[in-house]
Amino acid sequence: MRNRFLGLAVLSVAVLTILPPVLAHHGTASYDTTKTVTVKGTVSDFQFSNPHVLIFMDVKDDKGNVQKWQGELTSPNHLERAGWTRTSIKVGDTITITGYTAKTGATSMWISKVILADGTPLNAGLGN
Amino acid sequence: MKNHLVYAILALLTALAPAHLIRAQEARHPAVETKGAGPDLSGIWNARPPANAKLPELIVYFSTFGKGEPAMTPWAETFYKSAKPSFGPRSVTMEETNDPVYQCFPPGMPRVYLHPFPMQIIQLPTEVVMLFEYDHTVRHIFTDGREHPKDVDPTWMGSSIGHWEGDTLVVDTIGFNDKTWLDRIGHPHSTGLHVVERMRRPDHETLQIDFHIEDPKAYTKPIESTMFFELKPTWNIMEQVCMDNGSFLNFEKKEAVAPK
């Protein structure tokens, strides 16, 4: 009981002290940080490893064509401190991601927000 | 505008963090008694940027030492112009960067302080060990009264010795190789780099490190900088290996020009 309370307290402090994702992130030159985009789709791969966590998704456009999206997050170390585990997202999950898209126009983004199928938001954590 | 409001809310909510829970955890890990030394600096520490800092100041805090451009020599200017960082105002894409860290070379000292991952200080009677989570970087600061080796081998982290002046651990580091950038935005250093750190614990939850960075080959005057760290008693140092999943890193070797 005490550990769970402590864990919640740690999570809330960690979440509340999160700085904007773009703050300390290297490689932001690849992304257009002036606007965000949101896509919803099915997770096809989830690489919860250093240096950056990667989410791969199949996103259907309004014609039913599947677009392959890739989203980048910070280190799994920061995400774990913000409450994630390596199974927070699983292949087959339907999730919604929001972030800054690649300047090249490629379907990839630096993720600032993740929302699970049941509406639970996952904090995207501190950029490195 | 939105950012100001976000920071204000973050600052307010951070101030309401459960400090009593932090103290309860600390009681289970009592400080090490070190005879003849100063206060115990041991703990897990995470960089804490200045409160109320706006985004440009935050970027400076995590990208370089000092507040403005350092006074570079022509040698340093040449290097700086050819460096292509992937962070900060001059940043390029990961494909274009020639930052050695993004080819998984060690960040070295003092640059490792700028990467926002926690570090652990373990204070022992004859040395202070620093374990940085970033790239599993280790430092040994010998406090047993020794001098620097006469003909010091150049290393990525340098050779560090420390002594106490009252409540402050004064750390002197020389013996650097020249394979690292001084910071994350492409400022160089030479093998003549000399770093003096003054480390103290102004309160139980805070570590302050004042940096005095000298390198006459690169800078016409020393760089002064201060960083603050917050105690994180419930955190552990985790593994962070650059090569873990570097599929998107650019491993084509590109070096910044460093005229001898």
Image (cartoon, rainbow, N blue to C red):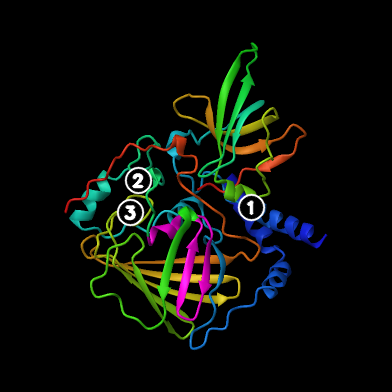
Taking the magenta stretch, the answer to whether it contains residue B128 is: yes
- Choose the circle earlier in sequence order: 2 or 3: 2
Residue furthest to the right in view is: A1
**Amino acid residing under circle 2:** Asp
Q: Residue at x 61, y 16 (%)?
A: A66
Please report the bounds of the magenta region as a residue range: B109-133
Q: Where does residue B89 sit, x and y in percent of width and height?
A: 39, 45
Q: Are marks 1 and 2 in contact (CB under 8 Å)?
A: no
Q: Nearer the viewer, residue B156 or B51?
A: B156
Image vertical order of residue A22 relative to residue B213, above or below:
above
Residue A74's image quarter?
top right
Residue B5 showing in the rendered view: no
Taking the magenta stretch, the answer to whether it contains residue B77 is: no
Helix, strand or loop status at disc 3: loop
Label 1 belongs to which residue? Answer: A81
User: Subunit of mark 3?
Assistant: B
Label 3 belongs to which residue? Answer: B181
Residue B45's image quarter?
bottom right
Q: Where does residue B205 sit, x and y in percent of width and height?
A: 60, 71
Label 2 belongs to which residue? Answer: B99
Residue A91's image quarter?
top right
Gap in angstroms between the C-alphas marked 1 and 2: 28 Å
Image vertical order of residue A53 relative to residue B185, above or below:
above
Gap in angstroms between the C-alphas marked 1 and 3: 29 Å
User: Subunit of mark 2?
Assistant: B
Q: Nearer the viewer, residue B34 or B228?
A: B34
